[in-house]
Image (cartoon, grey):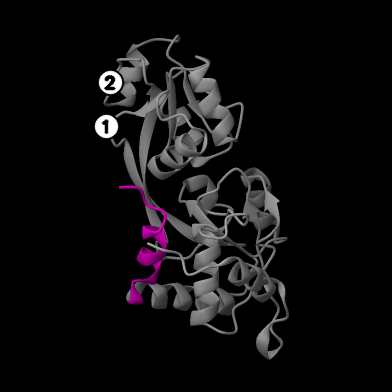
Amino acid sequence: MLSRWSLPHLCLTGLLLLGPVAAGADALRTAAQDNNALKYDLKNAAKPGICVEVLQAMSAAEPELRFSGVDQPMSLRRIEALLAEGQLDVFCALIRSPAREARMAFIEVPIYTVRHRIAVRADDAVNVQSLEEIRRLGPESAVIVNKSTAHEDLLRSAGGLQIDASSPDTAVNLKKLVAQRGRFYYHTENALLRYIEDGGLEGKVRLLPTVFKTEALYMVCSPRLASALRQRLQQALEKLARRGELERIYAGYRES
C-alpha cells in the first residue's frame, strides 16, 4: 500500500502531534520506541511507522485527541516505567502480559497482530517446530531475544532454554546471529523481514517456517489517566477498526 505521507506531510504530522490542542485540552504524552522501525521511523517519509500513522488517524477520527512526544525515542523499559509512574499517558503498541496489566491499562481494541518466528543462519539446516525441540538441542543452541520485551518474558517462562537477552537492538541481534553468537533469534515476523532487508542479510539469514505464536498489540495507558480520556481513546480506535483503517495502515507494513 502506498503511504499517504510525503515529506511535507510528515513535517506537518509532527506539528499536529506536538502543537496546541483544540478546545483547551492537553496533549496526551507519549514517546517513540527506539530500535523499532516498524512502529516509529520518522526519518522515513514514505513509511513513518505503524504507530505514527495510527496516532494521526486517531487525531483525525477524534479531533480533540492530540499526542505530544512522538518524536522522542526511548527504550521500551523506560517507556513502561514512565507509564506506570504517570509521566507518560499513552503508548502504541504493546503485547499484553500479566506483568504489564499490573502496571498499566490496555485499550480493548487490537491495533494489529504479529506472528512470532525464528531466524537462523542460512547455512544452518536446523528446522525446529517448538521451543521444546530447541530445549532438547542443549546449551549450545542459544536463543537470542530482544532485551526487556514480552518475547524475553515468554522464553524465560518456558524454562530450560539458553537465552541471550543482552541487547534490545534488532539490527545488533541479527549481527550476533550471523556471527554465530547464538543459533536462533526469536522475534516477530515483520520485524525480522524488515531488518534482514535493511541490513542486506537476505543471503545470510532465513526464517524457519513455523509460527510459534500469534499475538495482538494494544494501545496502553497510564493507570493515572482519567477514565474519560481512556474512553475517548477507545472510541477513536473502535471507529478506526470499523472503517478498516487499522488494517489498511498495517497492510502498508506487512510482508507477504
Query: Can residue 200 be seen from the camera position used here?
Result: yes
Q: Secondary structure at mark 2?
A: loop
Q: Residues within 10 Å of mark 2 (few under 14, many from 20)?
A: some
**Vertical placement of residue 124 versus 43, above or below:** above
Please say if the residues under marks 2 and 1 sit with CB atoms less than 8 Å apart: yes
Determine whether, in the image, residue 144 is placed left or right of residue 119: right
Residue nearest the viewer, comparing 149 with 202: 202
Task: Kindly identify the residue that appears in the image at 37 percent across and 20 percent down.
Answer: 122
**Vertical placement of residue 220 versus 9, above or below:** above
Residue 39 percent location from the top left of the image: 53, 54
Query: Can residue 163 be seen from the camera position used here?
Result: no
**Vertical placement of residue 207 versus 24, above or below:** above
Residue 173 percent location from the top left of the image: 54, 28
Q: CA distance from mark 2 to mark 1?
A: 8 Å
250 magenta-colored: yes
249 magenta-colored: yes
> Toward which corner of the image does residue 190 lie, by quadrant?
top left
Determine whether, in the image, residue 125 is placed left or right of residue 154: left
Task: Kindly identify the residue that appears in the image at 64 percent across and 44 percent down.
Answer: 77
Residue 28 percent location from the top left of the image: 66, 71
Span shown in magenta: 243-256
Q: Which residue in the protein does label 1 denote? A: 209
Quadrant showing the N terminus: bottom left
**Which numbered dot is residue 16?**
none
Task: Kindly identify the residue that appears in the image at 61 percent across and 67 percent down.
Answer: 10
Q: Secondary structure at mark 1?
A: loop
Q: Amino acid at mark 2?
A: Asn
Residue 57 percent location from the top left of the image: 49, 73
Residue nearest the viewer, comparing 84 with 41: 41
Q: Amino acid at mark 1?
A: Pro
Q: Which residue in the protein does label 2 denote? A: 127
